[in-house]
Image (cartoon, coloured by chain):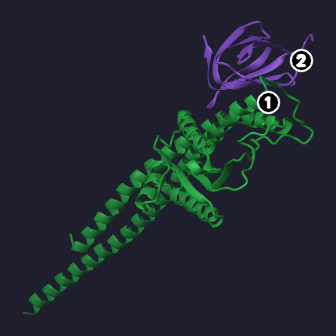
Amino acid sequence: MGAQLRVYTQKIKSAQTTKKITKAMELIAASRIAKAQARVAASGPYSRAITRAVSAVATYSNVDHVLTTEPENVNRAAVIVLTSDRGLAGPFNSQVLREASELTELLRSQGKEVVHYLYGRKAVGYFQFRKFPIAGQWIANAEAPEFVTAQEISKTVLEAFEKDADEGGVDEIHVVYNRFVSMMTQTPEVLRLLPLEVVEGVEEPESTDVLPLYEFEPDAESVLDSLLPVYIESRIFNAMLQSAAAKHAATQKAMKSASDNADKLITDYTRLRNNARQAEITQQISEIVGGADALSAS
Amino acid sequence: MAGRSLQVSVVAADHEVWSGAAVQIIAKTVEGEIGILAGHEPMLAILAQGEVRVTTTGGEKVTAQADDGFLSVENDTVTVVAGNASLVK
């Protein structure tokens, strides 16, 4: 076998092996999307109920709460960045990190200091490599987020929020994450958690659907006190679940195109190998014919 | 009040624990135990750690453990929301 032929055969083999891996990853991701989506759906009733309750309290009581009032001047803002633990998901992590740095730039241009809280190994790696300061980090299985992690994150950021600005407290909290739009689209999103902007759940209440006049037990203020941290928890948890579902969808898409590319490579190299083999045979024939001619001439 | 029933759902952070029609629901709030029947006024209450007992329209009793949550009542719909909730067998 000629040298050229051997090189092509090796390349085909390598493309085939790669394709096996990417194909397997594609199938695994595809099977996990459904599960991740089911978890997003399962957390729906909880976040809907909380959102509804928070809007009820915020609308029907005249409580001035530290979590709902806009501070006069914002000195420091916290940004929570949610990424995945692993790569091989196309632009999934880079787009959310880009969104985060754009937000950081924007906040800095408004004269605010920005502190970052990171969830997911990719975000931590990105910040560590660039030697950016990290206020808090969590690496805890971003592909299948746990509620306790959301509780930890919200506890940490709320503690920072309740501190005074002089002591390193923050006045705003933002979350940057990938929202699962569809199997094909995942868009990076920025959400301001605090001061409160109540984001309605999936079901928009109809305009006729007026929130009832609630009685609060023990009173509106303590209800709001205990409700808001829960609300923040549930928003963070929802963002984590969305991000996990989006990650699996992005992986599936990236691995599908990798498999397709491997297929194309295999076809191209097979053609080249056939050419090389044919050229070798032609050369051998002409050598034999030439040799026979030379022999008969002598 | 005959014929009226409550729509109860007990939800935890990551899943719905139980939902269905009920005659009565008893929960423990920070102020003490409260029983809710159909036609109760809208209310939001903070739950204390403890059991939530539901009597279904079929007369069965369902008990759930709930902590770290709240209870909302409106239009005969009762939602028990807790970070951690589970049914007690």
Q: Is residue A127 above or below residue A162?
A: below
Q: Residue drawn at (41%, 70%), measured in percent from left and top?
A: A268
Chain B: its colour in the image is purple
- Label at residue B39: 2
Q: Amino acid at mark 2?
A: Gly
Quarter-of-image position of residue B89:
top right
- Closer to the observer: label 2 or label 1? 1
Vertical arrangement, residue A91 with respect to residue B56, above or below: below
Q: Position of residue B28 (x, y in %)?
A: 71, 15
- How far apart are the two marked residues, 2 and 1, measured between alpha carbons? 22 Å
Pointer 2 indicates a residue of which chain? B
**Chain assignment, label 1:** A
Local crowd size for mark 2, using a 10 Å CA cut-off: few (<14), some (14–19), many (≥20): some
Q: Can see residue A252?
A: no
Apparent colour of chain A? green
**Residues packed near mark 1 inside 10 Å, few (<14), some (14 to 19) or many (20 plus):** some
Q: Position of residue A49 (x, y in %)?
A: 74, 32
Work out whether residue A190 or residue B56 is closer to the camera in this orientation and state it: A190
> Which residue in the structure is indicated by mark 1?
A220
Q: Residue at x 33, y 60 (%)?
A: A14
